[in-house]
Image (cartoon, grey):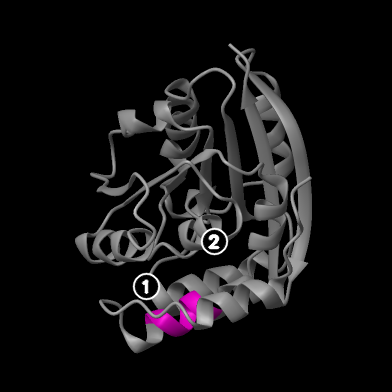
Amino acid sequence: MNSKVSTAELVKFLKQKTVHSASFLDNIKIAYRPYVCPFDDILNYMDNEKSVFDFGCGSGMLLSLIDEYKMPTKLGGCEITEELVKNANEVIAAKGKESKVYLFDGHSIPEEISNYDYITMIDVLHHIPKKKQLVFLKQLVGKMKVGSEFILKDIKKESILSYWNKIHDLLLSGEIGNEMNSIKLKSFFEEDPSLEVVAYTSRRMLLYPHFTLTLKKIK
């Protein structure tokens, strides 16, 4: 059975994981994000010794946690800026396993995701324009292999605290997020015959209302 990890344990690890190519502020965000994002739930769900691709992986903090605690066979990811791709590749290169983070053009889903057991997408969906969100998700799951799982974590639109996330995004990235109603999104996936909704969870961490949907590609 996989051993469970705690938020405090994840922060302790990330505080020692300085990314040389990242700014001081980015390193602070990397180290303390497990206090506001349920990385522990995601890691505790995953099986050991699987391949994982993180879509919109940022500076690679989740990939580094997976590398440390889940003994993955292969790691991958994609990001939209060269700086973040550089940061993430630095983070996951340390242990020498097959790993690569790709530059994402913002449109074409990387074909590489068909080679992974888990696809994760953490707090990326609300940065996609509203009219493109469902089309984007359909394209992504369409490229997954049968038997793989998609772990989608984002902010719950139906919570009043989603407005705090809008303020957060406005201050840090200069944009207002496009959060989705998590129950409606779950229903959308339930109507897809190629998918099975394995799990749905909801969790508030400080002022951030999260939901996590786990989907399995069945055909």
Magenta region? 26-31
Look at the picture and state if 78 lies above or below 134. Answer: below
**Earlier along the polypeptide chain: callout 1 or callout 2?**
2
Relative to the observer, which residue lies in front, 115 or 84?
115
* Mark 2: secondary structure: helix
Q: In this figure, which residue is indicated by the disc labeled 2? A: 68
Q: Nearer the viewer, mark 1 or mark 2?
A: 2
In this orientation, which residue lies closer to the viewer: 194 or 48? 48
Label 1 belongs to which residue?
174
Q: Could you classify mark 1 by the number of other residues whose Cα lies within 10 Å: few (under 14), some (14-19), or many (20 or more)?
A: few
Q: Amino acid at mark 2?
A: Glu
8 to 103, vertically: above or below: below
Q: Tell me if I can see residue 156 in this picture.
A: no
Residue count near mark 2 (Cα–Cα under 10 Å), binned few <14, some 14–19, many ≥20: some
Q: Quadrant of residue 23?
A: bottom left
Q: Secondary structure at mark 1?
A: loop
Q: Position of residue 6 (x, y in %)?
A: 74, 69
Residue sitting at x 28%, y 33%: 108
Q: Amino acid at mark 1?
A: Gly
Q: Main secondary structure of the magenta part?
A: helix
Q: Residue at x 60, y 15 (%)?
A: 194
Q: Pick the quarter of the image with the N terminus.
A: top right
Q: CA distance from mark 1 to mark 2?
A: 33 Å
Residue 17, position in %: x, y? 44, 77
Circles 1 and 2 in contact, beta carbons < 8 Å:
no
The quarter holding residue 158 reads: bottom right
The residue at 47%/56% (across/down) is: 63
